[in-house]
Image (cartoon, rainbow, N blue to C red):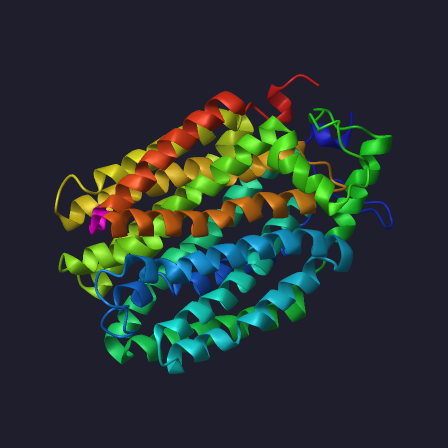
Amino acid sequence: MPAEDHPNRIVRPRAGELLHGIRHNLDQFAHQLLQVLLVGLTIGMMRTVVPALAESDFGVPRGSFLLLSAFVVAFGFVKGVMNFVAGRLSERIGRKRVLLLGWLVAFPIPLMLLWGPSWNWIVAATVLLGVNQGLTWSMTQTAKLDITRPEQRGLTIGLNEFSGYVGVAGAGIVTGYLASEFGARTGVAAFGLTVIVLATVLTVMWVKDTRPWASAEAARHLTNPPKYAPRYPRNISNEPSTWEVFILMSWRDKRLMALCQAGLVEKFVDALVWVFFPVFLYRHGVSISGIGWVVGAYGFVWGGAQLFTGKLSDDMGRHRLNVWGMWVCGVGVGLMLVFDNVWWWALCAGLSGFGMALLYPNLSAAVADIAHPNWRGSAIGIYRFWRDIGYAVGGLGMGLAASATGSIESGFWFVAVSMLLSGGVLRFWGEETHPKFTPA
């Protein structure tokens, strides 16, 4: 019986053979989990203090919702493009080099936060953050998928996103306290510089390139097909161009298109939490540290629940969890406006975080299910391109909605309705992708 039928059995590799599986590659898997934790800390430092103090410390006029949203719009466009670039670049120069490049780009960010004289500097720092996140987060996910088995993809991405979003939530809380103790700029800058230096050193010294594992998987598919046959798209060449993969992902394959549109819209929620949550709470008298805890409830539930929601999709399939996640998120956002109480806001933030936990690892896992190893890096990059463009589209949409009505609450309703509609599109256009639950 082939080794794939014994997921818990330790197989001794032949000379030069690369084995797949979390247990066989536990050292590198752990290094990559640490990397994505540091990636989450880097973006998390921007999510509590900066938006809440946009008016008082960074000169954004009260009620300028579009200007307030400008930094997340810029972030979304840049990160989306860099996801696209990172996926293709990683298939040419390797995963480790792309990861290291992402960390080198991040070094100016803390200094710009410390000394930037205006909101435009914050927007510029966020552009660099988009480059950093697009290169680094993409590579931590791609590298783990390279070294694990198909039946572990839900668990793999669940652990990846758990680690990353615990970092996001933790950084939001820590920087809130640092800002209260040392000032907004000094606290955030010192925290950010420490994280970026540590991540760079760890990448250079301990991270391995995982592209050889992807090549080995592709070769093994030809000689020893897996037990469960993935339903790869047939209308694409063996060595597709970037444009060919982009067209397939964006509209030629209805399954992949449904996943991409869901990924784009779900980022509306994250944009809302990043931009409007802190401002909304600050205007209702919540302290900076209190805002950190409310926003942290969203991040901690999102991150923590992915410890089981990713694995759950390996056991029962991806599609239902993805659809329900979209709808639970939308309901959580809408309920934020029902009562005026900090505990209620934390509860609703946690509900939205749980919805994100249902869908976030499993949309990515669904893409990985039906993307061939020859072009999986590109497929993940393109999916992540459309997903993170959602920051820009969502930030612009909720900014326009709030500006048109003069009420920040309109941004919440825009996001809630968008999530419910997008979940409906995914329900009818998408399908189950886990090879174990679909016919060959």
Drawn side of residue 45 relative to residue 289, left or right: right
Residue at image x 83%, y 46%? 17
Residue at image x 46%, y 27%? 425
Q: Position of residue 352 (x, y in %)?
A: 32, 41
Q: Position of residue 348 (x, y in %)?
A: 25, 42
Instruction: Identify the residue at the far top of this view.
Output: 439
Residue 192, quarter of the rendered image: bottom left
Residue at image x 78%, y 51%? 212
**Is residue 430 located in the magenta-colored stretch of the structure?**
no
Q: Position of residue 244 (x, y in %)?
A: 73, 40
Camera sees residue 151:
no
Residue 265, quarter of the rendered image: top left
Q: Is residue 267 above or below residue 319?
A: below
Drawn side of residue 222 relative to residue 171, left or right: right
**Residue interval drawn in magenta:** 405-409
Mostly what secondary structure, the magenta segment? loop
**Is residue 407 located in the magenta-colored stretch of the structure?**
yes
Residue at image x 26%, y 64%? 52
Quadrant location of the C terminus in the rendered image:
top right
Q: Identify which residue, 142 or 330, lies in the foreground.
A: 330
Q: Is residue 209 above or below residue 49?
A: above
